[in-house]
Structures are given as C-alpha cells and as structure tokens.
C-alpha cells in the first residue's frame, strides 16, 4: 500500500523514536496481539490503532498518543494492514539521512511481507555474519556488487517483489536525485540534526565500543550533505 511520504517521515522524528522506546520500556517486548516474545527491540513495531493519515499525523492526540499505539510483531503488523488490501503497484522508495537517523525504523514501520530492501549495512551483515554495525572494509567490493545487482533489478522492475526500499546515507544531492530519477523512486528524508544523531549514538548499546567509528560516519555525512 503506497502511503504518503509525510507519513513515512513521521517515523524518523525524535518524538516518535523516543515515545516508541518509552513504550517498549514500559510494556516490555511481548507482541500485544499474538503474545510472542520479540527478541530484538528494533523488531518491535509501534502500530497506530486509528490509522495515521497525512491529515491527522500532526495531531499528537492521535500520532503520539500511547492509547492509540500497540507494540506488535512484524507478522501481526502485516496481518493488521492486509485488511486494507495490497494494491499491486511496484513502488520504489529511497530512504536517506545521516547515520543514526532512524532509517531502518522507518522502513520497518512501513514495510510489508514480500517487499525488497536494499541496505548496505544489512548486506554486510548477510555476507560477514557480523553484527550490522560492524562493516569490514575489505568486503566492500563484494557487498557493493550485490547492492548494484539489486539496484539493477529494481530499475528494470525485475522479480516479484511488491515495493522496494533503498536505504542509505545519500548525502550528495546530485547522486541522490540521479538515482531517484533513474529508479522512479519516491525520496524520503530522515531529517535529524547532527546533535540528535550524536546523542542517539551516545545512548546506543550496540555501538558502545564503536563510538569513534560511528562519530566519524556521522561527521562525514554532515560534511558532504547537500540539500
Ligand atoms: Zn504478534
Ligand atoms: Zn501499523
């Protein structure tokens, strides 16, 4: 189901990210629908009972109201949205923004089963068996090869995927616009300040031993970013 870009970028706002974390702390990691334990907190979906629309997303009594939010697992979230029916078109989304800006959270909130995701961090993890924050330089050539193959498939709409999500920094406007045009992709910006990214890094348990490396990634993104 194609949703409006305004809705998608809501999931990268600081208000949403903080509220979701707060609710996870408060309610725990059991899916509110099926009762399964959700092992990784990043896989817990905050689902809006009254569905978000471009009209109501700025109304915080709906979008940021804990009573309107359920924490559920990926499968239950899919079932929840299947009610509205799958509309069949292959939409392509280019999700970009600095490291720690919530790109993966945004995609997890919006994705449906059968969608294709192209994310360099996830591809590194797939071929190295390392956690997704650890990206050995020597694997770059192989990882970018898989990445480019998938981008080609998206360009030609090859394969039976529903929607496609391309996740990355894409700080350079020229390269970003060219890719979006090439793929007929809708662009979604995770607009988070450098201070906020650094403060999220500070609080991130997974990256606690890699703060220097990730501070460099964040600084580099803001140094090369063009609007
Ligand atoms: Zn569930
Ligand atoms: Zn939902």
Image (cartoon, rainbow, N blue to C red):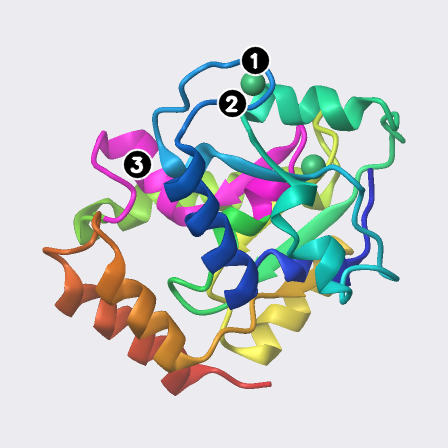
* Point 84% across, 53% down: residue: 53
* Residue in the foreground of this view, choosing between 167 and 109: 109
How packed mark 1 is, by other alpha carbons closer than 10 Å (few <14, some 14-19, many 20 or more), is few
Mark 1, ligand 1, within 8 Å: the answer is yes
Q: Residue under circle 3?
A: 125
Residue 57: quadrant of the picture: bottom right
* Residue in the foreground of this view, choosing between 11 and 89: 11
Magenta span of residues: 107-133
Give residue 26's position: percent from left, percent from top: 41, 41
* Point 74% across, 24% down: residue: 80
Mark 2, ligand 1, within 8 Å: the answer is yes
Q: Which mark is residue 34?
A: 1
**134 to 130, vertically: above or below:** below
Q: Which one is in front in this view, the residue at disc 3 or the one at disc 1?
A: 1
Residue 50: quadrant of the picture: top right
Q: Horizontal placement of 121 versus 116: left or right?
A: left
Give residue 149's position: percent from left, percent from top: 53, 39
Q: Horizontal placement of 142 versus 110: left or right?
A: left
Q: Residue under circle 2?
A: 31
Sequence-first tag of 2 and 3: 2
Picture quadrant of ligand 1: top right
**117 to 79, vertically: above or below:** below
> What is the CA distance from the residue labelled 3 to the residue labelled 1?
29 Å
Q: Are marks 2 and 3 in contact (CB under 8 Å)?
A: no
Q: Horizontal placement of 128 versus 94: left or right?
A: left
Q: For mark 3, give the secondary structure.
A: helix
Sequence-first tag of 3 and 1: 1
Q: Horizontal placement of 70 versus 220: left or right?
A: right
* Point 70% across, 55% down: residue: 63
* Point 22% across, 47% down: residue: 206
């Amino acid at each position: 189901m194609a949703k409006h870009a305004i809705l998608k970028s809501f999931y990268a706002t600081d208000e949403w990210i903080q509220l979701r974390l707060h609710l996870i702390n408060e309610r725990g990691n059991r899916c509110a629908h099926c009762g399964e334990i959700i092992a990784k907190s990043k896989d817990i979906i905050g689902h809006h009972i009254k569905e978000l629309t471009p009209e109501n997303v700025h109304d915080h009594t709906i979008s940021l109201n804990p009573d309107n939010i359920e924490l559920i697992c990926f499968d239950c979230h899919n079932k929840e949205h299947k009610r509205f029916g799958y509309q069949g078109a292959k939409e392509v989304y280019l999700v970009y923004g600095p490291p720690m800006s919530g790109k993966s959270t945004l995609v997890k909130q919006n994705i449906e089963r059968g969608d294709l995701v192209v994310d360099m961090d996830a591809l590194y993890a797939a071929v190295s068996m390392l956690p997704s924050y650890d990206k050995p330089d020597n694997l770059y050539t192989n990882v970018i090869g898989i990445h480019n193959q998938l981008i080609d498939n998206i360009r030609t709409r090859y394969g039976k995927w529903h929607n496609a999500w391309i996740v990355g920094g894409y700080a350079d406007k020229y390269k970003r616009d060219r890719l979006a045009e090439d793929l007929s992709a809708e662009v979604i910006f995770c607009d988070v300040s450098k201070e906020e990214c650094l403060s999220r890094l500070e609080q991130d348990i997974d990256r606690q031993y890699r703060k220097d490396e990730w501070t460099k990634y964040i600084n580099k993104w803001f140094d090369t970013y063009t609007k």
